[in-house]
Amino acid sequence: MFDKDTTELFNELKKDSSIKNFLESNQSEMKLPLHEYLNQLLRDKNLKKSKVIDQVGFDSTHAYHIFSGLKKPSRESLIAIARAMELNLDETQYLLRYGNFGILYPRNPRDAILISAIEKNLSVGKTNELLESIGEKVLVK
C-alpha cells in the first residue's frame, strides 16, 4: 500500500524543519480517510456496495453516509460492515485500528463472541443471533 515504512517516515519527519514540506512530499504515504479505505476494500474484494449495505443490518441511508464519509461509524457499525464484507479476523482488527477503535480483545466476553463469529465466518444476522443467545447486545438494530 505504501512505498515507505513507518521508520523511514519518522526519520524524515525528524529531519524536516517544515511540517508543510514533509506533508506535501509524503502525501501518497498518508492513510486514506476511513470512507475511502472502505471503498478501496470493496474494490479490492470485488464487492458491491449495495450488497454489503443490504447485509449490514442497519439503516441503509446511515450505511451509505458512512461509505460516503458523511458519518463516522461507531465501532459496532464498523464490525457489522466487516462481517458484511466477510473480512477475516486480521482484516477486521486492521479495520478497527484504521478507524481509531480498539481491536477485538479475547479477554472481553463480548469481543470473544465476535472473534468466534468472525472465525466461523458468520453473517451479521447469525452474529447477532449468537450474541443474543448468550445475552449480549446485538451489533446493530
Image (cartoon, rainbow, N blue to C red):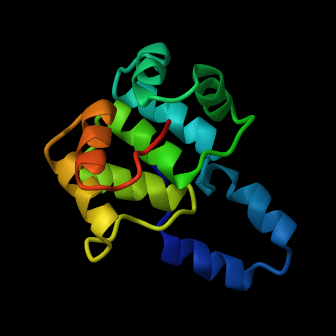
Task: Give the answer, above or below, for where 85 lies relative to 93.
Answer: above
Residue 25 visible in this rendered orientation of the protein? yes
> Which quarter of the picture shows residue 23?
bottom right
- Residue 1 percent across, percent down from the top left: 45, 48
Q: Nearer the viewer, residue 68 or 8?
A: 68
Residue 85 visible in this rendered orientation of the protein? no
The residue under the point 61% across, 45% down is: 73
Q: Which residue lies furthest to the bottom in this view?
A: 14
- Residue 40 percent across, percent down from the top left: 49, 33
Task: Give the answer, above or below, for where 120 lies relative to 134.
Answer: above
- Residue 57 percent across, percent down from the top left: 45, 28
Q: Report whether 60 appears left or right of 123.
A: right
The residue under the point 68% across, 29% down is: 65
Q: Which of 114 and 96 is in front in this view?
A: 114
The residue under the point 51% across, 71% down is: 6
- Residue 89 percent across, percent down from the top left: 26, 53
Task: Give the answer, above or below, for where 40 lies relative to 33.
Answer: above
Q: Report whether 43 appears left or right of 38.
A: left
Q: Report whether 25 appears left or right of 94.
A: right
* Number of numbered callouts drawn: 0
Task: Give the answer, above or below, for where 124 lies relative to 137.
Answer: above
The residue under the point 61% across, 38% down is: 35
